[in-house]
Amino acid sequence: MRIAILIFDELTALDAVGPYEILARLPNAELTFVAKEPGPKRTDTGALSLNADMAIADLPDPDIVLVPGGQGNRPLMEDEEVLDWLRTAHETTTWTTSVCTGALVLGAAGLLEGKRATTYWVYRERLREFGAEPVVARFVEDGKVLTSAGVSAGIDMALHLAALDVGEDFAKAVQLGIEYDPAPPFDAGSPEKAPPELVELVRGVEQSADA
Amino acid sequence: MRIAILIFDELTALDAVGPYEILARLPNAELTFVAKEPGPKRTDTGALSLNADMAIADLPDPDIVLVPGGQGNRPLMEDEEVLDWLRTAHETTTWTTSVCTGALVLGAAGLLEGKRATTYWVYRERLREFGAEPVVARFVEDGKVLTSAGVSAGIDMALHLAALDVGEDFAKAVQLGIEYDPAPPFDAGSPEKAPPELVELVRGVEQSADA
């Protein structure tokens, strides 16, 4: 099973690496980090680079495709080579997936039309621009399209995908393998739970970066 | 504040990238992925490489040091250059930290002597070899040494560190920023919670890899 994770400069690393840690363990997985051009991609903090091992042109028909978030994915929303690659891949994928604002790229490719979907909380309403119905959820499955909420939510989505694809026992074994028994020291991980002033602070920082 | 994350071939990517996503956002953070030799390091699944931007020799005195896990860290336990770097760094760090089996490397450097500590559940008892007292916990703080449980636990540890270093509101804002409101689809993330047959399965796979 070929799995393609699309990366680019200014991606949010955890969006990609969370699900990678699970999907790479699927039976017969051949997981590849792909990009328009192979080579190092510098993350949005500037402090890390991940390498794309293959060009998207050389992997036109993955079984699973995953698009992560990060400010660097906005140019992809107008990049016909990337959008065409996604549309073509989607014709034959088993699962077409996104983490965080990766959903905006799926939307720009026309793949969320008429679908229920989710994304990073700051951008949820923008999904309507692509004909999607925004849903407040950790992840949303609609047909073969799986979209997840922000950054860390890709871990939950990937475990769900592992269960769908292989079975619940397999997904549980992987969960144990990555000791995913989360215990955040605070309960501020969603806009519904965080103090309102912090919600506005984070929204402001995010939107100024997106301006 | 200089933060050094030590990487190596056959690391477990999420061990490093989870905390990175939080620590890189600390005020005035200068976070660097370091290795014995700079350059690409291939992860334990073989499907991804991360780049070390600097040699450990060129960053002898970080304020925070983090050692991740993965089978590839076992050779470091006998690598005097790495162990000396850790011992020297530890003399002036604010925090000396590990995720997963990174604790074994801290132990080999003598930094866990007389400390309470934790690590990946499969290896917890091995901490005694280094004079440490194993603790069943998501993360353990003893003096300036912070150790966490396996793989995903580094996220929880890093949020705790962010709160200690900057304050709870800051940590909560980062938690919201990465939408860390975990909702695993299963409750099998620790050996206490997973079905016993899966615990033995994962333990067997892990120990055969370590043989």
Image (spheres, coloured by chain):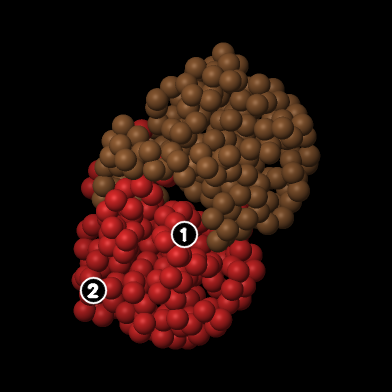
Chain colours: A red, B brown
Instruction: Residue A143: give its label.
Output: 2
- Circle 2: element type: loop
Q: Quadrant of the N terminus of chain B?
A: top right
Which residue is at the front of the view, B8 or A139?
A: B8
Say left or right for A75 vs B92: left
- Categorize mark 2 by other alpha carbons within 10 Å: few (<14), some (14-19), many (20+): few
User: x, y percentage for residue A181?
Assistant: 34, 39
Res B210 → quadrant: top right
Residue at 73% across / 48% down in the picture?
Answer: B54
Q: Chain of mark 1?
A: A
- Circle 1: element type: loop
- Categorize mark 1 by other alpha carbons within 10 Å: few (<14), some (14-19), many (20+): some
User: x, y percentage for residue B38?
Assistant: 74, 51
Which residue is at the front of the view, B195 or A38?
A: B195
Q: Is residue B187 visible?
A: yes
Q: Is residue A204 above or below residue A104?
A: above
Residue at 56% across / 30% down in the picture?
Answer: B103
**Amino acid type at image mark 1:** Ala
Considering every residue shown, the one lying at the far top of the view is B114
**Amino acid type at image mark 2:** Gly
Instruction: Residue B24: give its label.
Output: none
User: x, y percentage for residue A135?
Assistant: 21, 63
Residue at 54% across / 19% down in the picture?
Answer: B128
**Discs 2/1, front:** 1
Instruction: Residue A24: give its label.
Output: 1
User: x, y percentage for residue B192?
Assistant: 31, 32
Disc 2 to disc 1, C-alpha distance: 23 Å
Q: Is residue B42 above or below residue A67?
A: above
Q: Is residue A180 visible?
A: no
